[in-house]
Image (cartoon, rainbow, N blue to C red):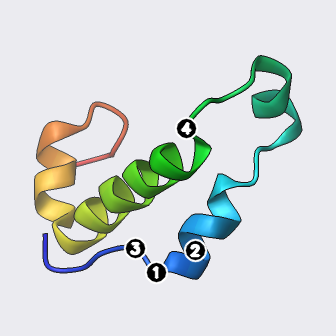
């Protein structure tokens, strides 16, 4: 991966949505960072995403 998530984006994503807050999270910042890192990986490698994902039309 060549990019890392922007800290502002991580902080924004770490704010739990109502359904996430209902379940709770002990590590929302770390979870947000992982989510955004995976998103960047998919964006940087759309062909790999199509190959690996059952949800992405190929």
* Label 2 sits on residue: 9
Measured along the vertical axis of the image, is residue 27 above or below residue 30?
Answer: above
Residue 53 figure quarter: top left
Instruction: Give the spatial CA distance, label 3 vs label 1.
Output: 4 Å
6 lies left or right of 9: left
Q: Marks 1 and 2: in contact by CB < 8 Å?
A: yes
Instruction: Give the spatial CA distance, label 1 vs label 4.
Output: 18 Å
Label ID, residue 27: 4
Instruction: Give the spatial CA distance, label 4 vs label 2.
Output: 16 Å
* Label 1 sits on residue: 6
Residue 26 figure quarter: top right
Instruction: Give the spatial CA distance, label 2 vs label 3.
Output: 7 Å
Residue at 16% in and 66% down: 45
* Label 1: few (<14), some (14–19) or many (≥20) C-alpha neighbours in 10 Å: few
Residue at 81% in and 43% down: 17
Quick one: SS at disc 4?
Answer: loop
Instruction: Give the spatial CA distance, label 3 vs label 4.
Output: 17 Å
Q: Which of 55 and 40 is in front in this view?
A: 40
Quick one: SS at disc 3?
Answer: loop
14 lies left or right of 21: left
Measured along the vertical axis of the image, is residue 9 above or below residue 41?
Answer: below
* Label 2: few (<14), some (14–19) or many (≥20) C-alpha neighbours in 10 Å: few
Counting from the top left corner in percent of width and height, residue 18 is at 88, 36
Q: Marks 3 and 2: in contact by CB < 8 Å?
A: yes
């Amino acid at each position: 991966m060549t990019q890392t998530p922007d800290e502002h984006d991580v902080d924004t994503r770490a704010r739990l949505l109502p359904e996430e807050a209902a379940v709770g999270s002990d590590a929302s910042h770390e979870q947000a960072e992982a989510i955004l890192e995976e998103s960047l990986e998919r964006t940087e490698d759309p062909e790999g995403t199509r190959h690996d994902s059952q949800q992405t039309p190929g």
